[in-house]
Image (cartoon, grey):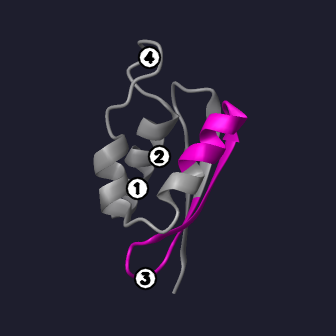
Amino acid sequence: MTRHITHACQGTCSRQIDIELDADGVILDVCFTGGCHGNTQGIAALVRGMRAEEAADRLEGVDCRGKGTSCPDQLARALRGAL
């Protein structure tokens, strides 16, 4: 069974993150709405096939320009919420 998670971003250029997880918590797909297109595509490609918990561990706390969060950090928060 595949789960779809939609996360409304706060404090970043990305407005929303859509995530598909399989039943074992493996990331099948990530799609950012807004943000730096190349960077968000790169993040999505890197985490595809990764366990959600591992991705969240790696991305949590990444800061963008002193905002206290970032697109990768928002992805980590969405994944933590889904776990």
Earlier in the chain: of badge 3 and badge 4, it is 3
The residue under the point 44% across, 16% down is: 67
Tag 3 secondary structure: loop
Task: Please name the amino acid that badge 3 sits on.
Answer: Ala
* Range covered by the magenta-colored residues: 19-43
Task: Please name the amino acid that badge 1 sits on.
Answer: Leu
- Residue 79 higher or lower than 41, as above or below: below
The residue under the point 37% across, 54% down is: 55
The residue under the point 39% across, 62% down is: 82
Any magenta on residue 33? yes
- Residue 32 higher or lower than 82, as above or below: above
Classify mark 3: residues with Cα within 10 Å, few (<14), some (14-19) or many (20+). Answer: few
17 horizontally vs 68: left or right: right
- Image disc number at residue 23: 3
Disc 2 + disc 1, Cβ < 8 Å: yes
Tag 1 secondary structure: helix
| Separation of residues labelled 3 and 2 (CA atoms) | 19 Å
| Separation of residues labelled 2 and 1 (CA atoms) | 6 Å
| Separation of residues labelled 4 and 2 (CA atoms) | 15 Å
Residue at image mark 4: 67
The percent position of residue 64, horizontal first and vertical second, equals: 47, 21
- Give the residue at the far top of this rendering: 66
Residue at image mark 1: 79
Disc 3 + disc 1, Cβ < 8 Å: no
In this rendering, does residue 23 appear at all? yes
Tag 4 secondary structure: loop
| Separation of residues labelled 3 and 1 (CA atoms) | 14 Å
- Image disc number at residue 75: 2
Tag 2 secondary structure: helix
Task: Please name the amino acid that badge 2 sits on.
Answer: Leu
